[in-house]
Image (tube, rainbow, N blue to C red):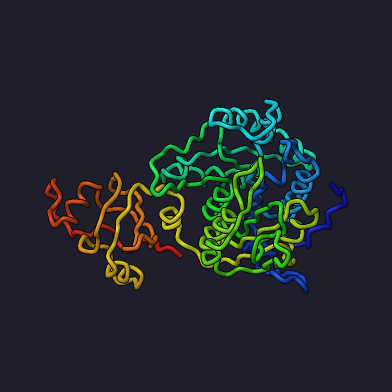
């Protein structure tokens, strides 16, 4: 691995009054990226760990060096790191990836402490401190815990500490009720996107083992790197992840999906190589590196939670009229527009909304539980005798897919 020095990040100055970056230097192709004040950097397993489960120290130190420069410039940095399972595999002497849930959790329990120790030493070399935050799906599913997470991260950032986040694979089991097999996060790409959106980050950098997103499989002889993608949702179905590796879970599909989540939350996203020494430095300086997903606006915090963070506990199947009414923004959802109800949910739970052909229309926060909803949709009043406007979902509590 080359140990060539990383070029200095272009200096960014902040005014004391607004704490926003001054105008970047000429020649920067992505000025909005260069102006990012709060940056989330996700390190993929294939960046930190080789196929034998060994840590690659140069790549870790290169990333920490850039993060330290960002801190010296007055910017805030959050790291989301994979690699715990891979490191634990080495200690257990496994020739291949863990084969069962218990073995995977054991690898994670060993690897998490080793990984954070490496980060602590690397940051100490730059007179910085870091703090580990381990998360499970339940931390995103329950809104109060979701809000508590933000408060914790804000306190760490305000204290000059670099938070290091990872899914807590040592206890995470993924057995909570799920609809259509959807997990809150099945890899750290999605975790990074949810954190970036939740913490109002300006930039999310997903570091992986390829240069960015290609118009076809990277190994195809005519594959072309895409420098900018403005509609990540349209790209998802055509992505071919290939065979993957023995140490990681997230492929390019998960990264583009993560980019979609973060971009809808008002965050710029760049997917770039964590194996190229200068790549991260170029990205945060606004240079053309990797694939850029511009921010697409910003959903309010509660609507972000409905759209991406909470687990869907049920499904409402809508007729074509109800789908059209929701997409036109005209009305809330009434029982007359629902043709089927699936799942067991309570008032305040999130459900998926699906068109007659099963296409996902969006997600919403229920005003009634499953039993009451079924009664309303069958033309009956709820059994508890409550007399209210029979609105199943308020339009303000619906987030459409997009």
Quarter of image, res 30: bottom right
Visible residue check, residue 196? yes
From the viewer's side, name the closer residue of 202 and 212: 212
**Left or right side of 223 for 62:** right
**Left or right side of 99 for 179:** left
Residue at point 62%, 56% (across, down) = 204
Q: Height in image: 383 above or below 297?
A: above
Furthest-top residue in this view = 92
From the viewer's side, name the closer residue of 49 and 237: 237
Residue at point 55%, 31% (across, down) = 100
Q: Height in image: 149 above or below 336?
A: above
- Spot occupied by residue 37 in the image (x, y as percentages of width and height): 65, 59
- Spot occupied by residue 29 in the image (x, y as percentages of width and height): 72, 71
Residue at point 70%, 67% (across, down) = 224
- Spot occupied by residue 359 in the image (x, y as percentages of width and height): 39, 61
Furthest-front residue in this view = 221
**Left or right side of 286 for 176:** left
- Spot occupied by residue 284 in the image (x, y as percentages of width and height): 71, 60
Quarter of image, res 116: top right
Residue at point 48%, 43% (across, down) = 148
């Amino acid at each position: 691995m080359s140990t060539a020095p990383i070029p200095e990040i272009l200096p960014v100055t902040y005014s004391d009054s607004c704490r926003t970056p001054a105008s970047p230097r000429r020649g920067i192709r992505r000025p909005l990226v260069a102006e990012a004040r709060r940056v989330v950097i996700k390190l993929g397993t294939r960046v930190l760990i080789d196929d034998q489960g060994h840590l690659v120290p140069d790549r870790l130190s290169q990333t920490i060096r850039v993060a330290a420069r960002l801190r010296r410039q007055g910017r805030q940095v959050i790291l989301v790191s994979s690699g715990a399972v891979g490191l634990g595999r080495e200690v257990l002497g496994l020739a291949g990836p863990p084969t069962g849930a218990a073995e995977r959790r054991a690898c994670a329990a060993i690897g998490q402490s080793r990984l954070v120790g490496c980060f602590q030493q690397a940051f100490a070399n730059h007179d910085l401190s870091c703090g580990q935050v381990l998360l499970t799906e339940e931390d995103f599913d329950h809104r109060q815990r979701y809000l508590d997470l933000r408060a914790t991260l804000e306190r760490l950032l305000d204290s000059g500490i670099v938070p290091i986040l990872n899914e807590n694979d040592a206890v995470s089991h993924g057995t909570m009720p799920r609809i259509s097999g959807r997990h809150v996060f099945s890899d750290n790409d999605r975790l990074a996107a949810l954190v970036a959106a939740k913490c109002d980050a300006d930039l999310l950098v997903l570091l992986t083992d390829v240069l960015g997103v290609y118009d076809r499989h990277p190994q195809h002889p005519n594959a072309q790197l895409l420098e900018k993608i403005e509609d990540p949702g349209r790209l998802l179905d055509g992505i071919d992840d290939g065979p993957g590796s023995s140490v990681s879970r997230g492929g390019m599909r998960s990264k583009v999906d993560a980019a979609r989540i973060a971009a809808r939350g008002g965050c710029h996203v760049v997917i770039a190589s964590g194996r190229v020494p200068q790549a991260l430095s170029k990205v945060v300086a606004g240079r053309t590196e990797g694939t850029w997903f511009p921010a697409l606006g910003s959903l309010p915090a509660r609507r972000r939670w409905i759209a991406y963070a909470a687990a869907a506990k049920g499904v409402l199947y809508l007729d074509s009229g109800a789908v059209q009414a929701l997409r036109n923004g005209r009305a809330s959802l009434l029982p007359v527009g629902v043709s089927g109800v699936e799942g067991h949910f309570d008032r305040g739970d999130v459900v998926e909304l699906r068109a007659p052909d099963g296409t996902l229309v969006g997600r919403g926060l229920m005003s009634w539980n499953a039993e009451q909803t079924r009664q309303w949709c069958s033309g009956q009043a709820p059994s508890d005798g409550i007399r209210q406007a029979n609105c199943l979902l308020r339009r303000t509590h619906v987030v459409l897919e997009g």
